[in-house]
Every structure is written in C-alpha cells, then in structure tokens.
Amino acid sequence: MDVKALSIFEVHSSLLRWTIIQVIEGSHLKTTDAECATKVYCRFVFDDAHTVTVFLLLLEIMSLIKGDFRCLDPSVLLLLAAAFFKIADTLLFMFVAMGCVFLGVWVIAHECGHHAFSDYQWVNDTVGLVIHFALMVPYFSWKYSHRRHHSNIGSIEHDEVFVPNPKSEIEWYLNNSPGRVITLAITLVLGWPLYLAINASGRQYDRFASHYDPYCPSWYARERLQIYIFNVGVIVTIYVLYHSALAKGLAWLICIYVLPLLILNGIIVFITYLHHTHTSLPHYDSSEWDWLRGALAAVHRDYGVLNKVFHNITNTHVVHHLFSKMPHYRAVEATEAMKPILGEYYRFDGSPLYKAMWREAKECLYVEPDEGSKGVFWYKNKI
C-alpha cells in the first residue's frame, strides 16, 4: 500500500474502525499492515483540514472502548492524546457552538412558556415540555416562576430572580479582583442549575424553594400536578442518558451533551445578568414600583451574529417585557418602532461583552436608595 498516494478522502472509515478494533481486541496484525494503518491514521489525525472528522473518529473510539482507556495500547493512547491536543481549539469552538445552538432551541421553549409559540396552549406546553426535558430544565415550574418575574420585574421585594442585595449583605471578597473572578466563574458554571435546584440568587421565601419541589411557595396548589409530571420526565431523561453512556461511553456523552449543556447554562446566566445589571438601571420598592417602570428596567446588548442564533433575545428584551406573547420574529421590528417613543428610557450598551461583564460585576455590587426618592434604588460598589 502506497501511503503517500492516499488522499484523505480515500481512507474509508471502515479501515480506521477496523484498525482500532483490532488494537482494542488485541489481535496480531502483520507488521506491514499495522505500520501502514498507523501511518494512514497519523496522516488522518494531523491533517489540519479535517479536525472535525478527527473529532468524530475520537468519539467513535471512545464508544468502542466504553470510556475505559486502560484497554488501549500505550502507543495508541499517545496517538489519541496527540490528536486531542491537536484539535483542542476546534473542540472548544465546537462545544461553544453547540451550546449556542442549544440556547437557540431553549429560546423556542421559553416562548412556549409565554404562549408565544402557538395560539394553542397544548401545542406550547407539549413543545416546551419536550425541549425542557432534553435540556434538563423544569418546564412548568420555571414557566410559573418566570411569569412572576415578568409581573414583578424591577421590584426589590417581589421580583423572582437577580434581586440585588443591600450593602449589609455584601461579602468582603466581592470587592477584590480574585474574589470577583471566582464568583463569576461559579455563577456562570453553576448559577442556572443552582437557581433551579435551590433558588440561589432568587427571591427569598420563608421556607426552602426549588423548581423541582411541587410544594414550593412559588406556585399554587392547582399547579403541583404539572411539577410532578416534569419530575417523572427528568427521571426518564436521566435513564435515557444513562443508557446512552452505556452504549456510547461516558466520554462520548460528556462531549456531545454535558459540555454543550454547561455552555448553555453559562450563556443563559451571562445574557440574563447583562440584561438586568447596569448602573443606569433602577430598582424600586413598593412605594415607587409599578409594572411599566419595572418592564423598562433592562438594557440591550449587541452579540453580533449571535443575535440571530439567539433569536434576538439579546437586543429585544424590553419589548419582550412589555409584550411577552409577541413571537421573537416580530421583536426586532417592534423594538425599532419603540425606540423613538421610549427616548431616554431606552437603554443600549455597545461595550464589548467581556468588558461589560467585568464592569458590571465590579460596579454593581449592591443597591442603595436614591437620596431624593427613598423608594428608588441604584447600584453602588463602595464598601
């Protein structure tokens, strides 16, 4: 076999699968065949134009060995490690891209919760439930708590999420760079699941609150059955994921599902945090709050091409607050029509997103009442 004469597209995947299977099963290959197959494989791995195909091959290898790398020959392990590091930047891009696509799908489910996807409630709930099952997000309970967020947006006392703290509750470590970095990292990675599981950063109740708890004080007794239904669905989803790991390997499941899901969780927190956190955004207590004031207390950001991927939830959030049943494909048009009407009450920040995230984490530590109106609160950072 003339390896030099082989084009990458002439190497059929069955040859690669056969080579790996033989190595895993410990079969004795002829020296010439083994050397030739290894050369072909090395050329395949280190061809810069085919990193995605290499990634798919790596997943195939992981599924064959069920995630147990101990069964591989050390030389093959070395080859796999070299291949992984060769395409690490591409893998990171793929995971982020998959997480962004996950978010685009989640936005559709979010619209189902607002009954903006269809005129029929059963269609909204069916589509939203299926998507939320796949993304491990409680559909009905989050629909109800998110509905209360829209009803109480900007209220210090009654909003459901991103409720700012008074100065007395701020920890010392938030006023230094290492503390902010660690806090931001934990918030982006774990903030969304912790909010759903234990109401972290959510409205304070007299008892424990969780989106998985049918008796949580966030919803009415008539809504409990739907929470039970979703919890059963979560068990089914975990069962499917478990058998996927058995069939394809744990590493395969992590690459295809877990890592993109973590990216999705981080993006949800990133976007919603930047929507509701800015020094120009007021919060109100019951003496000053009304629904319109609260609905306007959001800032738009520019995510470039990702605006389209995210169905423009990034730059149409105010109109979503005002008309939550409006479908996303009308939101851009409505926002443009709304801008001249709102005037100074329309807020847009075009800062680079990474700079905005760090700036808000630094400058928006707590809220204090305005000197002229005690019922209006503004972000401060002096500790």
Image: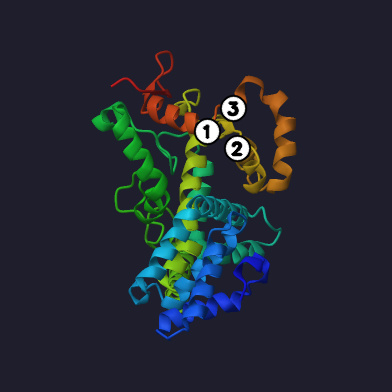
Tell me the tag on residue 353: 1
**Sequence order check, earlier mark of 2 and 1:** 2
Quarter of the view holding residue 188: top left
Above/below status of 74 relative to 332: below
CA gap between label 3 and label 2 equals: 9 Å
Q: How would you rate the neighbour count of disc 1 (Cα within 10 Å): few for under 14, some for 14-19, many for 20 or more?
A: some
**Residue 173 rendering spot, x and y as whole percentages:** 26, 32
Circle 2: element type: loop
Q: How would you rate the neighbour count of disc 2 (Cα within 10 Å): few for under 14, some for 14-19, many for 20 or more?
A: some
CA gap between label 2 and label 1 equals: 8 Å
Q: How would you rate the neighbour count of disc 3 (Cα within 10 Å): few for under 14, some for 14-19, many for 20 or more?
A: few
State if disc 1 and disc 2 touch (CB < 8 Å): yes
Kind of residue sitting beneath label 1: Leu
Quarter of the view holding residue 10: bottom right
Kind of residue sitting beneath label 2: Tyr
Residue furthest out toward the top: 372
**Sequence order check, earlier mark of 3 and 2:** 2
**Residue 377 rendering spot, x and y as whole percentages:** 42, 24
Which residue was labeled with disc 3? Answer: 350
CA gap between label 3 and label 1 equals: 8 Å
Kind of residue sitting beneath label 3: Gly
Which residue was labeled with disc 2? Answer: 303
Describe residue 311's horizontal placement relative to residue 94 as left or right.
Answer: right
Circle 1: element type: helix
**Residue 136 rendering spot, x and y as whole percentages:** 47, 62
Above/below status of 262 relative to 271: below
Circle 3: element type: loop
Above/below status of 106 relative to 341: below
State if disc 1 and disc 3 touch (CB < 8 Å): no
Tell me the tag on residue 125: none
Query: In which quadrant will I find the N terminus?
Result: bottom right
- Residue 286 appears in the picture as rendered: no
